[in-house]
């Protein structure tokens, strides 16, 4: 894997280190798929991807889940002053699917403070799903303000800014197939 500054995908930035390579990601996603398959022996499962960061993880993950499921997405507004004071989150795109009575698995790229997820969980819970769990590829375990419980976690993440496999820096680098921290 070419990770030097001549890799055209990196916009001239140098990778400080590869944190999770392609093979590690694939192996862990396979395990998560098996865990999720076992955790839902029955009922309707709706996998809800939080855009945009989850798009690559979600597409790999659902192909490792060996039971019927449906996929939808949601887009939450980034926090503004208003959102913080109201404690609410605004959905820019709201899933078309009904949540009522279904097992909902919310898929997120990385949990940092956990604020985004805490608000989303509160909002989605008002729609009476049968269950509501979170699957995050990465967890920084810095959740001081919000201890939102993530049932499925791919990896503990180091406290570095990570890009690739869906994660961006100012919208760049989402398409890099591994997870790296940049110089
Ligand atoms: P939280 O609400 O503080 O948990 O923020 C989570 C969101 O912040 C994630 O969905 C990412 O979009 C973004 N984020 C947090 N840490 C990183 C990182 O290391 N790289 C890229 N995005 C990150
Ligand atoms: Mg982001």
Image (cartoon, rainbow, N blue to C red):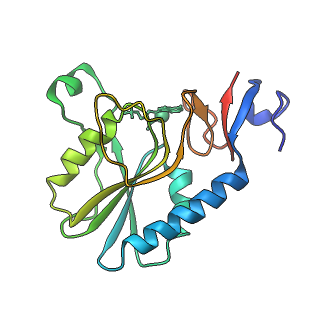
Q: Position of residue 28 (x, y in %)?
A: 60, 57
Left or right: 110, with 119 as reference point: right
State the image quarter where residue 89 is shown: top left
Query: Is 61 placed above or below 115 here?
Result: below
Q: Position of residue 148 (x, y in %)?
A: 30, 42
Left or right: 111, with 32 as reference point: left
Quarter of the figure with the C terminus = top right
Q: Position of residue 102 (x, y in %)?
A: 25, 69
Left or right: 111, with 28 as reference point: left
Between residues 146 and 10, which one lies in front from this camera angle? Answer: 146
- Residue depicted at x 68% and y 44%: 178
How many numbered markers are drawn?
A: 0
- Residue depicted at x 71% and y 47%: 21
Query: Is 23 placed above or below 122 here?
Result: below
Q: Position of residue 121 (x, y in %)?
A: 25, 47
Quarter of the figure with the N terminus = top right
- Residue depicted at x 56% and y 52%: 56
Query: Is 3 placed above or below 102 here?
Result: above
Left or right: 10, with 27 as reference point: right
- Residue depicted at x 47% and y 35%: 140
């Amino acid at each position: 894997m070419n990770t030097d500054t001549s890799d055209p995908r990196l916009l001239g930035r140098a990778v400080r280190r590869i944190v999770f390579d392609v093979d590690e990601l694939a192996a862990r996603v396979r395990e998560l798929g098996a865990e999720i398959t076992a955790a839902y022996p029955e009922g309707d499962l709706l996998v809800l991807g939080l855009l945009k960061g989850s798009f690559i993880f979600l597409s790999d993950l659902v192909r490792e889940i060996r039971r019927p499921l449906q996929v939808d997405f949601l887009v939450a507004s980034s926090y503004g002053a208003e959102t913080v004071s109201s404690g609410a989150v605004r959905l820019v795109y709201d899933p078309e699917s009904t949540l009522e009575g279904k097992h909902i698995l919310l898929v997120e790229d990385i949990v940092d403070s956990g604020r985004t997820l805490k608000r989303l969980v509160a909002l989605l819970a008002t729609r009476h799903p049968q269950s509501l769990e979170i699957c995050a590829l990465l967890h920084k375990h810095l959740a001081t303000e919000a201890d939102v419980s993530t049932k499925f976690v791919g990896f503990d993440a180091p406290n570095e800014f990570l890009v690739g496999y869906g994660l961006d820096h100012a919208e760049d680098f989402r398409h890099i197939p591994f997870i790296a921290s940049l110089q």
